[in-house]
Image (spheres, rainbow, N blue to C red):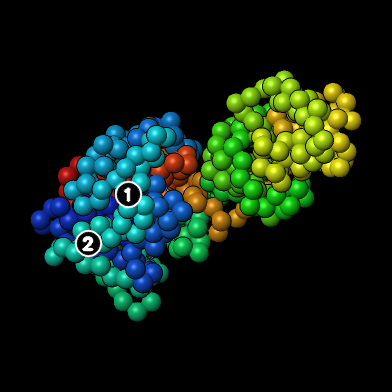
Amino acid sequence: MVIGIIGAGASGMAAALAAAEFENVQVILMERQSRVGRKLAATGNGRCNLTNLHASGDCYHGDAPQFAASALTQYDVAHTLAWFEDLGLYTVAEESGRVYPYSDQANSVVDVLRFALEKPNIQLLTGFEVKKVKKVDGGFRVESADEAISCDKLIIACGGLAGTKLGGSMSGYQLLRGFGHKCTKLRPTLVQLKSSWNGCASLKGVRANCHVQILHDGQLHSESWGELQFTEYGLSGPVIFEVSRDACQSSGNWTAKLDFLPDKDADWLTQQMLRRRATHWKAEDLLTGILHNRLGRVLTQSAGISAYVPIAQLEVDEIETVANAVKSFEVLLTETMGMDAAQVTAGGILTAEFAPDTMESRLVPGLYACGEVLDIDGDCGGYNLQWAWSSGRLAGRCAGGNT
Ligand SMILES: Cc1cc2nc3c(=O)[nH]c(=O)nc-3n(C[C@H](O)[C@H](O)[C@H](O)COP(=O)(O)OP(=O)(O)OC[C@H]3O[C@@H](n4cnc5c(N)ncnc54)[C@H](O)[C@@H]3O)c2cc1C
């Protein structure tokens, strides 16, 4: 039996290796780029956060997030770690549960997968961009601009639209639509947020530990704790990725409420600053030693206090205003950055049209899909790759014959 797989990213390689475990199976893995796992090699800031010890169904989203449960149970984190160990990858888990290769190099993950693909029953075709697929008698015909292959079963593992510079494209959605599948609205997620506040540009590059609440017309939309980074256009960093899902996707007022000192209350901070009235320090140093200097100055200024006034001359209520700015600073949001900057696509091919326990299409027997092309996206922290491994291995095994 010949199984065609379109896309040699995370889920496509996982599918190919699972399918090739069956001796009677011949896998043809097609990749439009010149090498496999190009996006994978850029994940986790080049470190590849390949899974998370705390992965569970709650970490996934989509119109029907429960769709992910079967794949994530059949191929859970323990299975994934054992599988990678078997492939030769040595991994370490951080306290947060995030798992990385011990080498700290995403390329190590790509390498062990690449080497594992070197099997007699896997044919890898790079530079093969699938343009057309169609159902033919007893199987599928898959065409690039100048070549065609035939296969008995077909797995679409083309990924999503996010990370366009690394290969994200509409291709998978289009190929599946051609078979009659429907696609939900695509949105960038795990993405930076743009702000109209011009303070962002002056704080470009500053990192801060922060509690972030995203408010929509004053109502809490999402919240998280962690590292925030200012950029020229707005807000970035792991904590922003975590709260970015569906932010700014509807009309109304979107704001980020930032607490730059989540472990201390405003009274504590006020007392610290009041003690400084006994010094010769200027107002620009009200927060020196507590926050990043640039951030401290911008927050003090935003409280309407001139940088060069001696702290000794400040009234208590002026100092309280600065404490409030540190604890509850609101930044107006305008939109998210685009798909090119996003790590993941929210939305995708409607999962109701696939069987969750096999990943097979309910519309076209013998057709499978896995990974980001489906309407499943995970939280920030290794959950999206876990979905790619779990859904890819399940699709490969079931296409190979073992359901
Ligand atoms: C910068 C960045 C950092 C990330 N970091 C992390 C992280 O640390 N942890 C985490 O869990 N997730 C991370 N992600 C998300 C994660 O990389 C994806 O969710 C995951 O790679 C999806 O796997 P996939 O197999 O569905 O798609 P992909 O890995 O994108 O693979 C799809 C493949 O299909 C190929 N393809 C597409 N169309 C065709 C066609 N017509 N013909 C032939 N080939 C085609 C593409 O070239 C690509 O190689 C990150 C994403 C980005 C962009």
Q: Position of residue 86 (x, y in %)?
A: 18, 48
Horizontally, residue 145 falls left or right of residue 396, namely: right
Crowding at dot 2, Cα within 10 Å, few <14 / some 14-19 / many 20+, comes out as few
Residue 38 x %, y %: 39, 63
Residue at (88% x, 26% y) in the render: 315
Q: Amino acid at mark 2?
A: Phe
User: The residue under label 1 is which amino acid type?
Assistant: Pro
Element type at mark 1: strand
Q: Residue at x 76, y 32 (%)?
A: 325
Residue at the disc numbered 2: 115
Residue at 71% across / 46% down in the picture?
A: 294
Picture quadrant of ligand 1: bottom left
Q: Earlier in the sequence, mark 1 or mark 2?
A: 1
User: Can you identify the residue that label 1 sits on?
Assistant: 101
Question: Is residue 37 found left or right of 325 in the rendered image?
Answer: left
**Beta carbon of the mark 1 residue lies under 8 A of ligand 1:** no
Side of 312 where 37 appears, left or right: left
Q: Nearer the viewer, residue 251 or 296?
A: 296
Q: Residue at x 86, y 36 (%)?
A: 310
Q: 282 or 318: which is nearer to us?
A: 282
Judge whether residue 153 can be spotted in this image.
Answer: no
Q: Observer-nearest residue: 169 or 77?
A: 77
The reply to whether callout 1 and callout 2 are in contact (CB within 8 Å) is no
Task: State the image quarter where residue 213 is shown.
Answer: top right
Q: Quadrant of the N terminus?
A: bottom left
Could you say which quadrant of the image residue 224 lies in?
top right
Residue 57 seen: yes
Can you say whether 119 is above or below 11 in the image? below
